[in-house]
Image: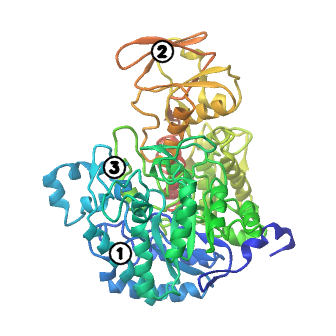
């Protein structure tokens, strides 16, 4: 470490989990989709070489401990138990031999299951509801097994589906499978296993929490009964693998639950219906004494999902105080995860508050971030912006199960900002067969990404931007106080552009493509705000103009449009001390699929907790001075007091030219989407030029 990096020194000291020494205090935490046993694919479980390559690259870039994403003990498709697939473990052994050459260690995370948290999709839900189709698809996917919970209860994702109660025989099968699979992992050279999980409201957590567990047998009722499943799992693993084989536990300190599908806000005073701190203090010690060698900890359940998967609205280091508190009650190592900042994490390690720092999605965005930290190149680290758009975009709104596309369900752990992550066969930088002159029109994120990809491939690139700075509409999107990572991303792009032979022409509006000296032209001119045909619409402030600070607003502000942008504006208004009101024509806020439930549920819960008025299934009739006249679903009209009105009803593509010979339209200029569609779309075009 350089002297300038002294504040990070504590991260680069060795520590032990049982008898296994880890070279540094940075843990790559498990993420759905990064399992070494590719269980998301329809073909069934197999050794996932894409995930293996992902981990090997991170290991070569100085990570201390890697914990891949969950490996279901029983294959989701076709129902085969993992321990019945010896070939997969032979391939795992070869991989472990390669990984150990880097000095990194790896624990395989094994899951008992998801129960009522299983993200049943809109495609599968109707098949499960019908007895005939449920039986028909059972050989391929046994939905009743996947949904099996401690007690009968509604699914988190489809409230009209009642999850069946798991039988004692099923519990014993799972315990046996933990032991058999862990033994195969040990024989393959894996350094330890992690049990998934008394955490995040997954199956073992549901058993431990009285709110979910209404059983009257030996697995329900008393504290000891509710934690019996998790205790028997670790004892079975230790019996099969020996006491010296480390077993970590994914653990949620507090559930942060106010009720069914209702989470608690940071700092909120509330009555905990899940695991409160008092029980957690007892449970942590109890689970340690049962045999667990480490707690890999944060907070939350699927009802308060934003604690376990913090979006940008959550504070950085949001779980640190709770996790560091629980460390006082155990003697085993404790890892803290959840928007952890490296400097804050290093200080917490140095002070003995935690033993290691858990980081997840930053590894997807920038596989070399630890190396850059070591080399004092912090400005080169591409920041994760906590969007969940590529890595975990399970989405849901009122009356809908998981609306995520099937291709996404089977392809988690990708990254909106880094297309190569878990998609190396589809996206990669290769030298162009013929170097060309490329003109990119539009200096937003899409235009900058296109310019960089083309330059990396050996093309000569000129980037044209009509304003005096690069960033496009993302400059406005990044202005809210909670978008510090978005602002850092814009700064990163501006620095990255300078590393390549890219000529940037600011204050240059391109109106005639024929005047460009280019072999290929990429149009990345974004989109323009939609208008709605209502009387007085001209009195409203466009969302972008508000975000850029072009027009001030009064105390009472009505936001027209309850999509993501409208909700984020309302959230920011509230943080500034204003009184926002949201008017939305749909039956819920943020109904667009592909936006993670962790993000959307935070905003919905925030508005509910803070009593922000939300008028759903309501349309705007007229905007006048001081009021907005609206009509609800019953045809009732009423006025909403409004000193200011902000219009956020979506966008239309605004290309300066259409697709044609050697003209390629990308990003929002082609189809309005999000940062993922903008960046991946840029690669789709630029890899072919």
Labels 2 & 3 near each other (Cβ < 8 A): no
Instruction: Residue 46: name its quadrant.
Output: bottom left
Report the side of 475 relative to 78 (left or right). Answer: right
* Element carrying mark 3: loop
Mark 2 vs mark 3, foreground winner is 3
Dot placed on the residue nearer the N-terminal end, 2 or 3? 3
Q: CA distance from mark 2 to mark 1?
A: 62 Å
Outermost left residue: 132
Outermost right residue: 3
Label 2: how many residues lie within 10 Å, few (<14), some (14-19) or many (20+)?
Answer: few
Q: Is residue 215 above or below residue 239?
A: above
Give how far across and how far down residue 246 sits, in percent.
53, 81
Label 3: how many residues lie within 10 Å, few (<14), some (14-19) or many (20+)?
Answer: many
Give how far across and how far down residue 676 sits, in percent.
52, 52
Labels 2 & 1 near each other (Cβ < 8 A): no
Q: Which residue is mark 1?
A: 175
Q: Which residue is mark 3?
A: 155
Q: Is residue 581 above or below residue 382?
A: above
Q: Which residue is mark 2?
A: 534
Mark sitting on residue 578: none
């Amino acid at each position: 470490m350089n002297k300038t990096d002294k504040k990070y020194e504590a991260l680069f000291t060795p520590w032990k989990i049982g008898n296994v020494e880890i070279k540094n205090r940075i843990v790559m935490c498990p993420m759905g989709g990064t399992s070494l046993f590719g269980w998301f694919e329809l073909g069934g479980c197999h050794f996932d070489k894409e995930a293996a390559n992902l981990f090997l690259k991170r290991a070569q870039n100085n990570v201390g401990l890697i914990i891949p994403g969950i490996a279901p003990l029983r294959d989701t498709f076709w129902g085969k138990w993992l321990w019945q697939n010896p070939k997969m473990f032979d391939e795992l052994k070869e991989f472990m031999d390669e990984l150990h050459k880097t000095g990194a260690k790896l624990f395989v995370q094994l899951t008992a299951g998801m129960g009522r948290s299983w993200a049943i999709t809109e495609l599968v839900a109707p098949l499960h509801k019908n007895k005939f189709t449920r039986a028909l698809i059972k050989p391929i996917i046994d939905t009743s097994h996947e949904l099996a919970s401690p007690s009968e209860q509604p699914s988190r994702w489809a409230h009209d589906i009642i999850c069946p109660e798991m039988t004692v025989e099923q519990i014993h099968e799972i315990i046996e499978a933990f032991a058999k699979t862990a033994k195969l992992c040990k024989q393959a050279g894996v350094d330890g296993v992690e049990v998934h999980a008394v955490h995040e409201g997954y199956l073992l957590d549901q058993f431990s929490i009285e709110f979910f567990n209404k059983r009257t047998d030996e697995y329900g009722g008393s504290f000891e009964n509710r934690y019996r499943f998790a205790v028997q799992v670790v004892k079975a693993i230790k019996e099969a693998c020996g006491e010296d084989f480390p077993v970590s536990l994914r653990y949620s300190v507090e559930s942060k639950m106010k009720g069914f599908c209702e989470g608690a806000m940071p700092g909120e005073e509330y009555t905990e219906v899940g695991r409160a701190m008092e029980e957690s203090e007892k449970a942590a010690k109890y689970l340690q004494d049962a045999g667990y060698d480490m707690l890999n900890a944060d907070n939350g359940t699927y009802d308060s999902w934003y604690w376990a998967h913090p979006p940008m609205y959550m504070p950085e280091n949001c779980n640190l105080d709770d996790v560091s508190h629980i460390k006082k009650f155990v003697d085993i190592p404790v890892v803290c995860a959840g928007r952890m900042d490296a400097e804050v994490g290093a200080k917490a390690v140095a002070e003995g508050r935690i033993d290691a720092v858990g980081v997840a999605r930053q590894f997807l965005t920038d596989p070399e971030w630890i190396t850059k930290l070591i080399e004092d190149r912090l400005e080169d680290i591409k920041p994760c912006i906590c969007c969940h758009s590529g890595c975990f975009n399970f989405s849901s709104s009122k009356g809908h199960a998981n609306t995520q596309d099937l291709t996404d369900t089977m392809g988690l752990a990708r990254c909106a900002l880094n297309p190569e992550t878990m998609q190396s066969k589809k996206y990669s930088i290769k030298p162009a067969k013929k170097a060309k002159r490329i003109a990119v029109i539009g200096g937003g994120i899409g235009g900058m990404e296109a310019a960089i990809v083309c330059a990396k491939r050996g093309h000569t690139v000129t980037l044209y931007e009509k304003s005096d700075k690069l960033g496009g509409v993302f400059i406005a999107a990044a202005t809210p106080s909670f978008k510090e990572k978005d602002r850092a991303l814009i700064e990163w792009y501006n620095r990255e552009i300078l590393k390549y032979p890219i000529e940037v022409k600011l204050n240059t509006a391109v109106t005639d493509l024929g005047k460009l000296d280019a072999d290929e032209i990429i149009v990345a001119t974004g989109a323009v705000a939609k208008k709605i045909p209502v009387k007085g619409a001209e009195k409203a402030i466009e969302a972008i103009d508000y975000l850029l600070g072009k027009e001030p607003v009064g105390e009472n502000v009505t936001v027209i449009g309850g999509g993501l942008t409208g909700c984020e504006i309302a959230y920011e208004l509230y943080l500034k001390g204003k009184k926002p009101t949201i008017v939305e024509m749909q039956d819920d806020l943020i109904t667009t699929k592909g936006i993670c439930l962790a993000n959307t549920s935070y905003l919905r819960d925030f508005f509910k907790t803070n009593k922000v008025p939300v008028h759903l299934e309501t349309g705007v009739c007229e905007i006048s001075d001081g009021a907005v006249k609206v009509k609800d679903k019953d045809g009732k009209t009423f006025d909403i007091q409004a000193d200011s009105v902000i219009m956020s009803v979506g966008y239309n593509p605004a290309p300066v030219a259409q697709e044609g010979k050697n003209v390629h339209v990308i990003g929002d200029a082609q189809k309005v989407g999000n940062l993922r569609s903008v960046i991946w779309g840029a690669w789709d075009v630029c890899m072919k030029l």
